[in-house]
Image (spheres, helix red, strand yellow):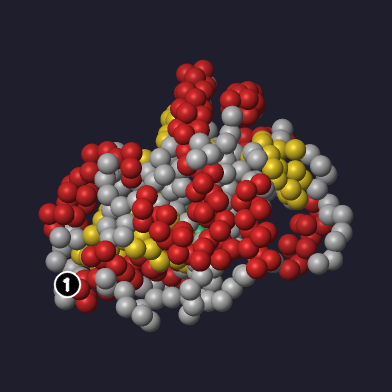
Amino acid sequence: MHMKKWLLKDAQEWEGRYLMRTYKRKPVMFVRGEGAYLWDTEGKRYTDFVSGLGAVVAGHAHPDIAAAVADQATRLVQVSNLYYTEPQLHLARWLVEKTFADRVFFCNSGAEANEGALKLARKYFRTVKNEERPDVICALGSFHGRTLATLKATGQPERWGPFEPLPQGFVHVPFNDLPALEDAVTERTCAVLLEPIQGEAGVKPASPEYLIGARRLCDRKGILLMLDEVQTGMGRTGALFAHQHYAVMPDIMSTAKGLANGLPIGAVLATEQVSAAFAPGDHGTTFGGGPVPCVAALATLEALTSGGLIHNAASAGECFRRRLSELQAKLPVITEVRGMGLMLALQLEAPIAEDVALGCLERGLVINDIGLHILRFLPPLLIGQEQIDELITALEELLEGAHAG
Ligand SMILES: Cc1ncc(COP(=O)(O)O)c(C=O)c1O
């Protein structure tokens, strides 16, 4: 690779010339990370409250994960799923032993995990139950990915138009509305697909009554509960998976993001009964479950559990939430504090989220704005008191200033 000293304006110029215009990027180019910190091309340090959109759960350049990846990269990177590889088998066993699931399918991203989950639910009814039930009920406001089927599952109809025709068989109902969910179930329904906390919608948790009610409804109707834990999984909410807070077990679950601390991987987890639907040839991928992301995932799981990071997500998350609530008491522009563990958001009365996020960036703090009214925080799970305090001080000044201005 040609090495040059990059300036931000060079990156912006190259983007203008060579990249498709799919992203609205913030004006910064990162070159290095360590723990909760990132550094830009000028050597300026930032505290990261986005962690690669919730992926870098164990922090940047985690030494054990980096060592596992480097070691694996020198031995074996890719043979495809025509053959056995050791890291994939260990990872599958770990996930089965620690979750509701009996079997796992590995892929490369969250959208792919949801695609696999949707195919599994449909095939389960066609081949195991011998019933024609293709429809999946999803929630409005949800986000499940950007492939054609997961875009249609995503409960944001305004995003569908340019890509029609999209796959059929998706029904949408208001989130956290149990009667609406009950009304939507028909003899063609195979599954209900929900995020325990809607992430891209701005961190909106399912109420316990809703998730527990959805589980009971699925049991009563003999249909599947599918949980999308792409964003809420891997310790983010203070439990390995968010559904554990609710004491609700899904039949199928998708996860991705934090699974390999930022390397691309996704997984579909399911019970034995449902997994039985997949036979050789039904589903597959060239790269999914490759040795490098799988050793990264094993080292990530070690850091989350033995390394105490899930525990820190719960305790630091509680402290972070309390500090945000104190801010809300002082600043009327904050209308709501939402979230669980280290998946948190502020709802703002005024359309200042982007300005505040840019103000934070100038001060060396990376936070995420969703639309004009929501700020989201997804730090690495090792974030500490001092870093949270630093953010709260900046937020107080910026929210006061932006609102007054
Ligand atoms: C809940 C949820 N599902 C699915 C996805 C899609 O994941 P990916 O971007 O890895 O395809 C995301 C990504 O933000 C997500 O938050």
In the rendered view of the protein, which quadrant contains the C terminus?
Answer: top right
Residue name at image x 73 percent, y 68 percent: 18
Residue closer to the observer: 337 or 290: 290
- The residue carrying mark 1 has its beta carbon less than 8 Å from ligand 1: no
Residue name at image x 61 percent, y 43 percent: 59
Residue name at image x 43 percent, y 48 percent: 233
Q: Amino acid at mark 1?
A: Lys
Residue 343 at least partly seen: no
* Residue 98, image x, y percentages: 37, 50
* Residue 129, image x, y percentages: 17, 72
Is residue 69 depicted above or below 204 in this figure? below
| Quarter of the image where one finds residue 126 | bottom left
Is residue 278 depicted above or below 325 in this figure? below
* Residue 224, image x, y percentages: 23, 60
Residue name at image x 15 percent, y 60 percent: 222
In the orientation shown, which residue stands out farthest toward the right? 5
**Few, some or many residues within 10 Å of mark 1 (<14, 14–19, 20+):** few
For disc 1, the marked residue is: 129
In the displayed structure image, the side of residue 141 where residue 380 appears, left or right: right
Residue closer to the observer: 18 or 189: 189
Residue closer to the observer: 280 or 147: 280
